[in-house]
Image (spheres, rainbow, N blue to C red):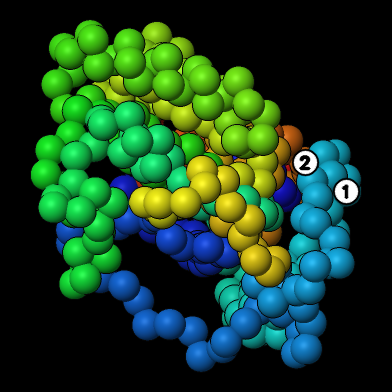
Amino acid sequence: MSGATGTWHVPVIVAMLAVATSGCTAGPNFTPPAAPAVSRYTAPGEKTSFDAGPTAPRQSVAPGKRVAGDWWTLFRSPDLDQVVKQAIAGNPSAVVVIVSDHGFMDISHAVNLLIPFIQAGLIQGGPTQGATDPATKSPVVKSWKAQPWMAGGMAAIMLHDPNDLATEQQVKTMLDGLAANPDNGIAEILDRDAMKKRGTYPDAAFLVVLKPGYYTANALTGNLVTPIPGHRGSHGFSPEYPEMHSSFFAVGAGIAHHRDLGLVDMRQIAPTVAGILHVPMPTAKATPLKVQP
């Protein structure tokens, strides 16, 4: 069973696979579990997107491709194989669910959006414009009218005064000019109405959506766009990019075999697991996935 991104009667083992965690947050009462006693989930010596050379193949999405019944072996992790096999062998009623919280994309260029805001006078620094605090490495800001909040492959543009229409128009003109140059890596600029339709950043004036491979960075001087050395990847891009699709797998008692769930809403995962556990979830905003035979 696979897809792309309460009385306890059935044991459920949930494994979260996150290839990158920068930018992710957890609630204030979250207690992190102990890290597994492994350093990687790939075969020894096998190259990954973190240490692969410049000629390494890019990740790809193959919609509709049949997934093997023992799909967990595709991760080529002996430790994961052992956990799944022991869980099923020791408890035939167990269900194993593996979920990732986001996709992953190669990045090749950094887009330093703070620079044009500083140059336009929308961000005013301390005695030396563009200086950073040596302790926090953050920009020294005396005052600001508008600034970008970096979010990986996107940036929310915030106004100090949301009702400052003059500054909003100044920012729009500047962003439109930046987006007009294809070398700047900007895919689109969303205004308030467009952001509302997509359900993102309700307090922002604009959203800068970058092209695949371009990633926000925090340089205060120099070029707007700079190359990222080596072979790197991350997340935080528009969910419309297929590379951002996450993964959902399930196997065990009462779970259909070889069913392709297609593209699913991540909000369906929690009520799906609740259904496997026979736990009511009246506040769910999405319908459970059809995982039964």
The answer to whether residue 121 is above or below residue 237 is above
Horizontal and vertical percent for residue 168?
29, 15
Write the residue at 66% across / 47% down: 213
Viewer-nearest residue: 270 or 233: 233
Provide residue 265's location: percent of width, then percent of height. 55, 33
Up-down: is 235 above or below 30? Answer: above
Q: Are marks 1 and 2 in contact (CB under 8 Å)?
A: yes
Q: Is residue 39 left or right of residue 258?
A: left
Image position, residue 270 (x, y; %): 44, 44
Q: Quadrant of residue 232?
A: bottom right
Residue that appears at 57% across and 87% down: 39
Mark 1 / mark 2, whichever is N-terminal: 1
Q: Amino acid at mark 1?
A: Arg
Viewer can see residue 258: no
Q: Secondary structure at mark 2?
A: strand
- Residue on which disc 2 sits: 260
| Circle number at residue 276 | none
Which residue is disc 1 drawn over? 66
**Image side of residue 31 versus residue 43, left or right:** left
